């Protein structure tokens, strides 16, 4: 269960409105790497976490913080939109300043949101659940979390350079700092998983003896040029300490031709024998089902 | 420019059809963490890479390999669907085996794909470009790549346990191995970035002096319980070697109330003064635009 | 079956083109609360309506009208785009007026639509079926319809203030009026459902004796401050005439901890016992399936 | 800012696992009318609310409660999935019970979620921000909220009938009760808005004198049959107390033909004059831009 | 403006319910190649058609017919769902027949639609406007229409083979016939465009003298093997009667390396010179804007 | 398996940056009719092709070429964005040129892509797999391919007119030419299918004797006016050489009323008998399941 304080985690007061920047900030609210993503990703990871104790508590701490980050950004957007022009568009283009503002605004913030933030990115695409992951495997998830904080801090840094409003910059300096901590924190959590003997370097830390080990070591040189042979990834011991790394300079396909089996006539796919599948007889029970039933009986 | 060999990178031959598993394999083709994702993510990262030489070559090597992984999986799906039942549904439920198969199948593989793979996940949701990122910052992107390979290998491992067809397992053993190498490879590439002095631990490796450093160090204890204080993330030096890590046991909001400014009457938002905004006069030039113009003149 | 008249339900003639406004009007065509939504929502409700007679006839009357509203708006958009600039973009920015127009235009109306309307909202997001509902429960659906007409009229009012073209305003005055009638109409239909003894105030009008009645009455005060105790919703008889309304000032969770059960090793989730699930033995038949089979046998 | 308690708002303990029902419950988590929708809808409405005091406090109370409802459902799903079969699919179809369960399961709950809930609906479609609205107009938004609680309670009632697990039913009885209260509550809030003189019956409560009043009163009889003339919506005073309601028995279109203007040759639309627009001369400055510039100069 | 008849264009009466088939039929309602697609595609093409007379009238005739096809299918779905099991899922799996039906059903048709059709495809993905095109170029659009009718008839044929209910088959025989006519009709309309001298074979029928003609003739042999040299597409005169067709057996890239320009430091992309872009100075006015302004001044 | 050359298929060098055009070019990358679509459509068609030899080889030749087209466009976008303004937005509007550019730019190309191309269309909507089809029926698919190349060339032609940068135009002249060849090529492939006796004019070339032939011939005149009677589609022999074409001047519905069956009380749909479905008794086994079981026993 959750509770709410009226005050923001950190102040979100622009010195003056800036509707063009209000649109750009949407990327940090409803973009693939915005605050709705980390909120929902961490909430679902926390609810799906099977390890009671410090891990679950950590995930829920951060998840709960992130809801408040969406709140800060949504508040900032509403304030940046104060007095945003809803004026007649034909008249507006008489005034280049007004016109430029209109061109750069998010029309939905006015028409749909009434001067408030939208659950969308800077191009108006609604946030969706396909952006998040909560796999139950903490190593795989923490790697996704490091990535999310890295992309999030990068986008915040870019937006930080796109404004000189002291109030906006002040809030973004807080966001940058939290993203710095959160990157360090998830990296430390990955180290902790190893110390606790729960996961190793590669996720999932299993099946190494079953997989085709001989293919777990080499870069396939499939793009012209061999500069990639110069990198750390093509030499020495792998980060997991268990594999050697190398390069396959002139790779050849190992499999046979990429063919598909003959079509079931009832699906009216084009067949290769030059005979059109006009009005086929039902062939029920042949093919897969025949084999399957045979085996099962 | 690209070229194509007729043969598969690795063999993709099931011993017998299995339309239920054919549906599950769709997750590895068109799911958020499937092969279409790594194909497109690496291609866009390669095209957007500003560092000529080993990094760009590496990214394009792997991107090109991944197109061939989609090919292997699509071929496997078509073969698993050989003879899949397209029979009448009411009759089908007479036979529990047939019925179970129908219940577990992907109806679009038959109706739309004619017995072939779809560009969707195991629930039929089409793959979309919102799954990928190519930011131009190699540290942020390589972290996303490690995450993608980790989630990808995890899902492959789960599917590996859901079949006992030797041919399917043989192909998945190759996929598992490649995912092992690719995780190690991207982790090595992150180390290489540091060795080359191009990026550090936290992305982007900039703005640390500008951000509010005092907020870059502490876990906010916002979820009941303090088990999270026990982890590595709450003590000692951070992974970036530059920050100390701590915990804020009883956090208080630092900002003011989350209020929004009074509405523009022309947007017909509900105002707080008990007066309905009936047919407002135009207020053009007030608010943001007034301040903005004043400053600009 | 449907038939079509060549003439529009109401005139849609702008005095002059305005490509910037043509983009904004897309919100009324393909937005979540636009005319495609009410068209499809009412059509599916009508086809799914199990009450022959006045209700079904009403729904089909309005559904059929709404198709014509999409037609009016699409025609208006094409006319607002007459002669819209498809000129070279670098040159365009020499001329502030032209530049502003280009900045505010919908690029797809030109590139994809050839100067016509798109099946998208003002930000270019395609209309989708997730916006609509047809539940078979007329009370629930009519409440959704009131909401749709309310949001629709609100957005129309906002757009009405953003133009001073007499022709555009003339059409929008018709749209506003229809939305006024349709709101009244769906509200009247809700009253009619009660008069006919088919539904009550709360949807569905069932299960009141089975639900936990003691939790059907109180506001949980989960956000700091108790101003919400002042509203009608915290005192007296509820609108359904059957419940009392109150407030729970200091709510405590009623459930136990939000834990998840131990993971199946074959899913490679991280387990809490410090042992990594390396290459687990198959445990087939344990857990849920065991219990389930036991009960069924 | 938010805080989190470890305990659930209400208990979420099934008596036994039921992976088929676990899939159906996804509709209440990530469906258009599920708990993610009301969570996000109320949060954005609260942040966008311009009326300090009881309204804003109310919205934030309920928004905060709803996050906890997603938590209850996600916890229930993980428990219903305990031991869910991840076994080989071909073998599975030998056993009709197992087979049926596999057919009815959500494959992503295992493959992606590792036995946990997904941010999707019962068909696997990810939740998205297009489901919610926060318009700044409290009347329009409260009508949307009544609709959301009505559809939500309806779906909960349907799911309540689809299980006989006492633990699941116990939780759903709580959910039903909350939905009952929330419907009453938003209806009471609409009454309160009127009492406070902030809004009337029709949203937005403005522009009635400007709109074409003569079209704000009649049902257009566009579907064959005139049963719809029998309803309350075709007679007497409208619910807003300001309009009369009637019916237009034999409606005729009021507008002219739905034509579109001649195409700009550079857009290569097909023109009506039988001349193909081969390699057109640039016509820059004609059409809209000419008129526009003329007016502005 | 539109009008509605109560009767269906063709009868839609199954002999008995079949909820599994009801799910499959969704592909014809809300799939990419279903009836919602042709309805909306033809409506937008009609509204965007700039050629008054026979073409516009034709498009509107068919568009109007297609609305009625959605109606037929939605009615069929509701009837196929009569009495569909909403029973408890754990109990259901005791009975293999019931279990199979539950496994193969669309859960949303019950939970959301109350036993009615959904605006989605057979996998539950909502229909969206990205499926349609209305370009204003009649040749390009009619080619898209032929494709839509071809895929539509193919899917109908597949579904026709998946049922033996005489009532369902009777309706599908009508649908197949209409799709046959509509394919012929759009093909005839393409011929008519040529006869009228409005378009040629290739869309748009323009710019042939400007394009690089030498690249408008050859197949690039980029996939191993040269079987493709045997087809009509590699020899003789092209269908447009204006080009020769040939093959480029051993194609070489014509362009230079696929490099991207050095990054703007404020975007924090990784640069190639080994220097991290820490806290860059603003470089405003350099790069593109400098060149642009220079040229404009 | 695939391989990659470093050089582009054709040069992609603009003379100068143009960030506004860089946004528009996104339509050719990630739009419904852009290069990602033809890449993925042809790849899946090739993998799903059941006809070994010239057809499969052709499809894979073109699929492989198209990956390189995405590469050319992504490279062009990065170059057009060189030095694109990331400056402060409030300052920017002081300068009309800068302001106009900002208004017309794609904010994600900077914030997310770091100055590179996005996997989205010109409005920022991510590319998705719902745009493509690979049905296994070569006639249906080749018709979709002709349509894709037609819409693709049309959009390229429109963009060609929107720039006067010689470098951009040079690349687009190559793209136009390839689209010309590809249209001719797919049209020739359709002829080849007929010559090989594999498919006829109408897809699928089957079921003509089973469908209701009498409905395979006539245009239903459902839109006011009879200009459509003048076209080739209403007279003479159909393109398939097997049907006559005519017109139904005054069409009447052939089916009965569009009614839906009485609701299952457990679904809480509103019933027509004036009795509310309060707390229904379970009716398990009635309706469909009863009939179904009876038949099966």
Image: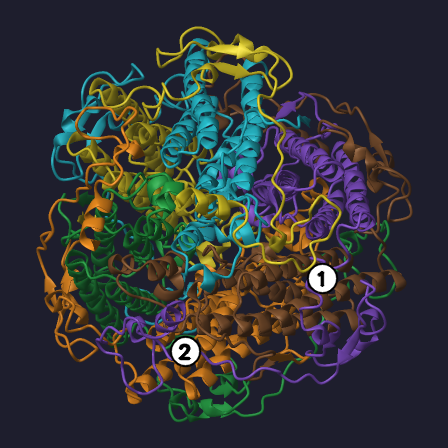
Chain colours: A cyan, B yellow, C brown, D purple, E orange, F green
> Which chain's residue wears label 1?
E
* Quarter the C terminus of chain D occupies: bottom left
As helix, strand or loop, the secondary structure at mark 1 comes to loop
Q: Residue at x 30, y 76 (%)?
A: D265
> Which chain's residue wears label 2?
E
Q: Residue at x 55, y 39 (%)?
A: A79
Residue E82 numbered mark, or none: 1
- Residue C185 on image: x %, y %: 76, 66
- Residue B22 on image: x %, y %: 44, 46
Relative to F259, A184 lies left or right: left
Q: Which of D243/F123 is in front?
A: D243
Q: Is residue F108 above or below residue A89?
A: above
Relative to F50, D26 lies left or right: right
As helix, strand or loop, the secondary structure at mark 2 comes to helix
Relative to D197, E202 lies left or right: left
Q: Which of F228/A246 is in front?
A: F228
Label 1 and label 2: CA atoms lie apart by 34 Å
Residue F181 visible, this angle: yes
- Residue A245 on image: x %, y %: 22, 22
Residue D272, quarter of picture: bottom left
Total marks shown come to 2
Category of crowding for the residue at label 1, using alpha-carbon neighbours closer than 10 angstroms: few (below 14), some (14–19), many (at least 20): many
Category of crowding for the residue at label 2, using alpha-carbon neighbours closer than 10 angstroms: few (below 14), some (14–19), many (at least 20): many
Residue A197, quarter of picture: top left
Residue where numbered disc 2 is placed: E183
């Amino acid at each position: 269960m959750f509770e709410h304080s009226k005050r923001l985690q950190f102040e979100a007061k622009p010195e003056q409105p800036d509707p063009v920047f209000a649109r750009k900030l949407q990327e940090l609210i409803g973009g693939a790497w915005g605050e709705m993503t980390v909120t929902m990703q961490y909430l679902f990871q926390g609810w799906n976490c099977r390890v009671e104790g410090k891990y679950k508590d950590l995930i829920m701490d951060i998840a709960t913080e992130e809801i408040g980050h969406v709140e800060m950004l949504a508040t900032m957007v509403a304030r940046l939109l104060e007095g945003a022009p809803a004026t007649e568009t034909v008249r507006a283009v008489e005034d280049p300043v007004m016109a430029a503002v209109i061109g750069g605004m998010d029309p939905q913030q006015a028409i749909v949101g009434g001067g408030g933030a939208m659950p969308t990115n800077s191009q108006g695409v609604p946030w969706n659940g396909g952006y998040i992951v909560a796999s139950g495997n903490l190593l795989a998830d923490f790697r996704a979390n490091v990535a999310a904080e890295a992309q999030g801090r990068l986008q915040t840094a870019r937006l930080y350079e796109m404004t000189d409003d002291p109030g906006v910059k002040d809030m973004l300096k807080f966001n940058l700092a939290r993203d710095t901590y959160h990157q360090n924190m998830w990296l430390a959590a990955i180290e902790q998983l190893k110390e606790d003997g729960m996961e190793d370097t590669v996720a999932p830390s299993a099946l190494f003896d079953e997989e085709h080990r001989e293919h777990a070591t080499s870069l396939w040189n499939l793009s012209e040029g061999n500069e990639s042979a110069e990198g750390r990834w093509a030499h020495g011991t792998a980060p997991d300490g268990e594999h050697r790394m190398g390069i396959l300079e002139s790779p050849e396909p190992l499999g046979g031709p990429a063919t598909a089996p003959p079509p079931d006539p009832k699906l009216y796919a084009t067949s290769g024998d030059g005979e059109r599948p006009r009005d086929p007889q039902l062939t029920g029970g042949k093919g897969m089902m025949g084999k399957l039933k045979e085996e099962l009986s």
